[in-house]
Every structure is written in C-alpha cells, then in structure tokens.
Amino acid sequence: MTMRTARITAWPWWALVLISIGAGALGALSHAPYDLAPFILVPMVAAAAIAARASGARGAGGLGLALGFGYFIFTLSWITEPFQVDAAVTGWMAPIALVLLALLLGSFWAAALAFARWAGGGPLAFIAGFAGTEMLRAYVFTGFPWASPPQALVNGLAGQGLAFLGPHGLLLGMAAVAALILHLRSSVLSAALTVAATGLILVPPLSAPSPLTATTVRLIQPNAPQDQKWDPAMIPVFVDRQIDYTAAGPVPDLVLLPETALPYLQETAQPVFDVLADAARGAPIVLGIQRRVGDAYHNGLVMLDATGQVAGTYDKHHLVPFGEYMPARWLFRHINVGGLAARAEGGYAPGPGPALIDLGPLGTALPLICYEVVFAHNAGGAPARPGFLMNLTNDAWFGTRSGPQQHLAQAQMRAIEQGLPMLRAANTGISAVIDPRGRILDALPLNVAGYLDVTLPAPAPPTLYARTGDAPYALLLLVGGIALVVQRARARRAQAIDAGRPAA
C-alpha cells in the first residue's frame, strides 16, 4: 500500500462518503443549467480513484453509491417538476421520487465500482465496469440514460466522437481518460492530459457549416402550461393559437406541431384538422395527438395532407414508466396512483416500434416523441435511413430550469450520432433546428409562444455509429468482463496454492 493510498483509506468512512457525494455534485455542474462541461471529469476521476483505492469491493460499492447519488440528485433535480403540476395530489411524491431515482441510478455506479475493485481496481477493470453498467442503464427496466456523461460533451469538439463511437463508445474513451489521469505516474503528465481533455471539451466543433436544403419547415410552439393544457376554458386559446401560427406568413413546405398538440382523440379531431389544413394552405402538417386503436390508447402523431386527411400515423413505442403507464398497475391502483402524463385510463399502450413517416417530395422522417429521443438505439432503430429526425415533445412537464435544456442536449446527441438534422417542436420550448453536427442553428426560447420558419439542413453521410450501433461495444464489454472474472479466479487460485490451501 502506497502512502498516497494509505492517506485516503485512513480517512473516516463518513468523510469519504461526503467527499464522494460532493464529487458527484460537482459533476452535475457539467449539465444544464450550468453547462460547465469540464466538471464531468470530476466524478469520472473520483470513480477511478474509488475503484483503485477503496477498502474492498463493499467499500467501493458504498462510495460508488454516494458518488452516483450526489451526481444524479443534483443533475436530475428537475424530476420534481411533474409532481408540482397537481401539487395538491402528487406534490408529496416529489422529494421521494427524486431521492429514490438518485439511489436507483447511483446503484449502477455502485455495482460498477464494486466490480472494478473486486477485479483488482486497475484501469481496465474500472473502464469495463463503469462503461458496462452505464450501457446497462440505457437498457434495463426499459432504460434511463439521461445524464450519461457524454451528454455533457455535446457542444464541444469531444462530443463529435458520438458520430464515430456513439454514447457508449465515447463513454469508454472518457473512462480511459479518467483512469489515465489517475494512474499516470507523472503528475505533470496527468496535468497535461487534464488540460488536453478540457480543451477538447471546450473547443466547439471545427467542421464547416452544414449545407442547407431548399425546404422550409415551420416549428410551432403554443406555450401551453401543463396545468392549463387540458383545462376546458383554455383549450380554445391554445388551439386557436396554433391555427393562427399555421396561417401566418409565407407558406412553408411542412408544418410541425408538438406532442399532444390537440387535446382530443384523433377520431373526434377531423373538424380541427380541416381548419388547420386550410390555415396551412397546402403544406402537410405533422402534429401530436392521442389515438385510440381498438381498446388501446396511444400517444401518437398524425400527418395531414393538403386536404386535412390523415395520410400517416405513428404511435410512441418507448413510453415513460410512472408517467405514461404504471408498472405493476395492479399494485399502484390500490393507492390511487396513476401515470402522471397518461390521459387515458390505465395509461397508454406502446406502438409497434420505430417507423418512418413518408412526407412525399420532402422525403422520409423518423419521429421521436418526447422521451424516445433520450435513447440512441431508438434513433438508430429505423427500418431505413431517413432524411431527418423529428422530435415532438411536451417539455412543460420538465419545468423551466434544467429539464428542457437537458432534453435538448439529448436531441443534439442523436443528430450527431446519426449524422442527420433534427427538427424539434416543443410545447413550451425549446423548439429548434439542429444540424447533423449537433449545432443549434435556430431556436425558440422557453416559455415563449410563437413559430419559427427554419431551413432544413442536408443530411451528412451515414456515420460509423449509424452503421454499427451498440453491438460492438456490448460485445467488447462482455468479453472484457468475462476476461476480468477469469483473471480474478486465476489469481485467487494462485494465492490459495501459495498459501498451501486447496485451490477452489
């Protein structure tokens, strides 16, 4: 044991826990609303230190939980906002939900660092453990990769690595940098690497401006607060606002309205479709609306042709647990707890999966409704490559501080990963056009009612990540994890033989 290690492990346990929580909290500064991106290195290096120097796997797991708890409870503080929409009924759940979510997500970091310490605590063990559990976080229990460390890099040159590596490959690289900063024998080299990494994080993308098409798209932002959106007295205000914005100015090539833009079921909305079509003056319209198919209700969208007839549909397939549907509904209905965002009794049913919308002369688009844009594999799961991505969302649920901005950052990630432009229509903001390098070309700010006519950027060539997806990194992490387990078993066997005990 080195003196450096001894000084750390000799500290009181409570002090190590507090330091770990603090390191995680500093990492939260890398995300909106602060956007101090280099701070993401703090919890990453702290995680590598815990994996290398904690007192055993159990100690590493405990400190990893504290580190993750500090990171997620501050980064995801917006999660309390949905519970305040009807505060008299659900407000009491807000702090409980935040703490439980931070503990749940922190448990992934706990597992990562416990495994890494058990496997010897070296750089490879840390990289495999941390990157592997972060990949699991994107998939298990339907996944929740919000605030993945690569999200902090989206506006810098380092974030362009998403086009080549995707979020999980880029996280492997980030974990490798953190491990090197910690384990390099020369403090000068560690400092130089830290400065270089900071530079890559801060320097903006260096590529030339993306070429533009001749297509003009109108993004409509009605700015309906969530506590008024379904109020019968306010519904005409928000519907008329969207009709007026559709009819304003020159005729665009496409009109894009947000998630659940109309507070009706599709089957009863044809009169409003007709009015919108007249206002659009021949332009096709894509808008979010609830749909009923048989006995199932869907959070979906429709594409209206020039006559107001439905020419295409899509139903959201990646639903928000505890928002749009309730896991174990048989349990929660006994305490009168339902999905916060589900307007249909019993919640929404998922659609069949990713699908393209055919917009005729404008080509095809891949719709991602709200939460679906959080997942890289949703954007990469289309049956064919689209011309652009569409994100229809109702971020009124997320409040006015960090949630909508973090959601926008994830839309930028998907654009970079696929090399495709992203058109985003958000109820209360932030509506935006994003180029294939993830740069925001124009946007409507939060809590502003209005519309924005934008020119659609041309798609870039398919990226390496668009071709490979997550499979290579899943295989690499699986093989690496198995190798570490085998290496650990051999080391234990050798120790047993050296001690004169029978090998296990």
Image: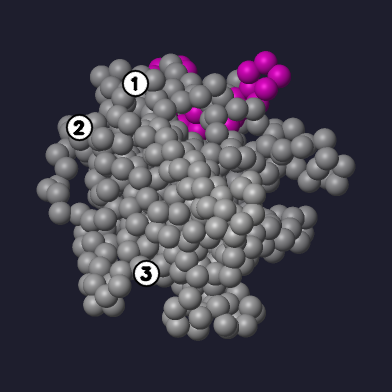
State the residue at coordinates (60%, 74%).
17
- In this orientation, does residue 330 appear? yes
Q: Which residue is mark 3?
A: 182
Q: Which residue is mark 1?
A: 384
- Cα separation, mark 2 vs mark 3, equals 37 Å
Frontmost residue, 119 versus 77: 119
Judge from the rendering whether residue 113 lies leftward or rightward of residue 286; answer left or right.
right
Q: x, y (%) of residue 441?
A: 25, 50
- Cα separation, mark 1 vs mark 3, equals 43 Å
Q: Which residue is mark 2?
A: 461
Stretch in magenta: 285-310
Q: Is residue 411 above or below residue 276?
A: below
Q: x, y (%) of residue 390?
A: 38, 35
Quarter of the image holding residue 27? bottom left
Q: Earlier in the sequence, mark 2 or mark 3?
A: 3
Question: Element type at marker 3?
Answer: helix
State the residue at coordinates (55%, 58%).
498
Q: Is residue 322 above or below residue 158?
A: above
Frontmost residue, 133 versus 386: 133
Please name which of the two marks, 2 or 3, marks the residue nearer to the observer: 3
**Number of on-image labels:** 3
Binning the other alpha carbons within 10 Å of mark 2 as few (below 14), some (14 to 19) or many (20 upward) gives few
